[in-house]
Image (cartoon, rainbow, N blue to C red):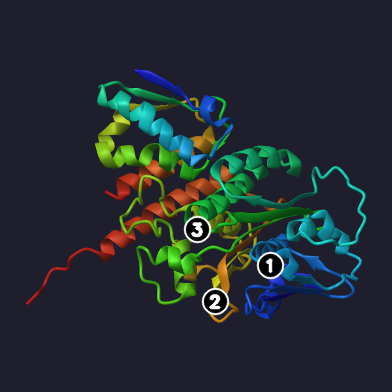
Amino acid sequence: MKIHLPNSAFLGNIDPFLRSFDPSEPDKLVITSNKNWISIHPVVLSMVAALGLTVDSSCITCESLEAKSRHYLERMGLFKFLKIQSGIAVVEHEPAGRFIPLTQIKDSETLTKFVTEMMPLLHLEPKHADPIRHIVTELVRNVIEHSLSHYGAILSAQYFKKTNTIRIGVVDTGVGIWATINNAYRPKNDIEAIRLALTPGITGTTRREGGTEFNAGAGLFFIKSIATVNRDFFMIYSGKGMFKLLKRDTNSIRLHADPSKDRHSEHNDYPFWQGTVVGVDISLNTTEEFSLLLDLIDKVYKEAIKERKKERYKKPIFV
Amino acid sequence: MIDVKLVNFVGGFAENKDIARDIRLSKIIPALDEGKTVVLDFGGIDSATQSFVHALISDLIREYGNEVLEKISFKSCNETVKKIITIVVDYMQESD
């Protein structure tokens, strides 16, 4: 596998980075980087770390990093994660208010502990804390429950002062969305599976409306809705499919049960990612009250179920 | 009547679905089966995820029908928690 850390890779311009990923030769990992400057979304770091876990550290080649921002990679814990020496001496600072370094979560108890400890690190007001806690817990629980990944969820997050935005990346190297959704539906490809996973009430655990006792099929719809309402980017990449929610360009807030009606870009020809990658930006400037968002979700969710029920109605036969 | 003080099990942020299921199986269902009413006390909980609430109550609505909502009450919920409970209760009833 080869992965190149570019000059810049955030959700708005992440496409070339994803396209440059080479998944061939999965038993080794070669990491290269831009020589001058590396400015990347935490999801990029989470991807590199997640790949690193799947190969023996002796099979990881990390090009000597020359970019000034290589300290950032050290501080986020990338080299520790990859079990390789960076040769960088970094003075440790109190991380509060700045970032959550790369973290591996493999079970429910660790997640609960992490969420409890994480929120003070980000120094958030309740208005911001609610959506971010939801996003992190729902994404990581998805990994724990559905990915079947031996390595669990790899996440990292960072506050960007210039844009007043929290950026979050949660990545796994599990079975991927197509395999999960295919347990109950028959998506013809990765992007169709991603669209189904984003639809409220659709879960890979059952076709029954309302889900199972444990899964409703609402988690990703909630996250996409948070991003939609707040005009934030949201990106999900699995297999060869990539769906990116683009920023809302109107003032009117409208949620869609059908993700293809959202302002978005999608592709089904990306290099194959074994597992699932999710990146989210939460702008702290535009965060709407969480309770307003919940009202909208309630309305759209009920409409979506009604629509699906209606599609299954038997039609009268007129002769 | 039994009163389940959830904060004792999940702390201030109710997100652990495994605990939600345990509470449903070990406390709520036995009480309902004995004909008791159940008070789910959200006092001290500042937020809950939809997944937590789903794991806590969705199967009750499915198994006992929506009449079970006359036997369960939700106490000391803030605005966010009320809305999340409403979402789950609504979609479960729509899903009948």
* Callout 2–callout 3 Cβ contact below 8 Å: no
Q: From the viewer's perspective, is A249 left or right of A199?
A: right
**Residue named by callout 2:** A240
Of circles 2 and 3, the one toward us is 3
Of circles 1 and 2, the one toward us is 2
Query: Where's residue B34, x and y in %?
Result: 26, 22
Report crowding for label 3: few under 14, some 14 to 19, many 20 or more residues within 10 A (C-alpha).
Answer: some
* Callout 1–callout 2 Cβ contact below 8 Å: no
Query: Where's residue A171, x and y in %?
Result: 62, 60
Residue plotted at (45% across, 76% down): A189
Vertical placement of A304 versus B33: above or below?
below
Secondary element type, mark 1: helix
Q: Amino acid at mark 2?
A: Lys
Q: From the viewer's perspective, is A284 left or right of A237?
A: right
* Lower position in the chain sequence, tag 1 or tag 2: 1
The chain containing the residue under callout 3 comes to A
* Lower position in the chain sequence, tag 2 or tag 3: 3
Marks 3/1 same chain: yes
In this view of the protein, which residue sits in the foreground, A157 or B86? Answer: A157
**Residue named by callout 1:** A11
In this view of the protein, which residue sits in the foreground, A9 or A229? Answer: A9
Q: Amino acid at mark 1?
A: Leu
Q: From the viewer's perspective, is A41 left or right of A7?
A: left
Vertical placement of B48 versus A76: above or below?
above
The C terminus of chain A sits in image quarter: bottom left
Q: Amino acid at mark 3?
A: Leu
Secondary element type, mark 3: loop
The chain containing the residue under callout 2 comes to A
Q: Which mark is residue A138?
A: none
**Residue named by callout 3:** A148
Report crowding for label 1: few under 14, some 14 to 19, many 20 or more residues within 10 A (C-alpha).
Answer: many
Give the CA distance from mark 1 to mark 2.
Answer: 17 Å
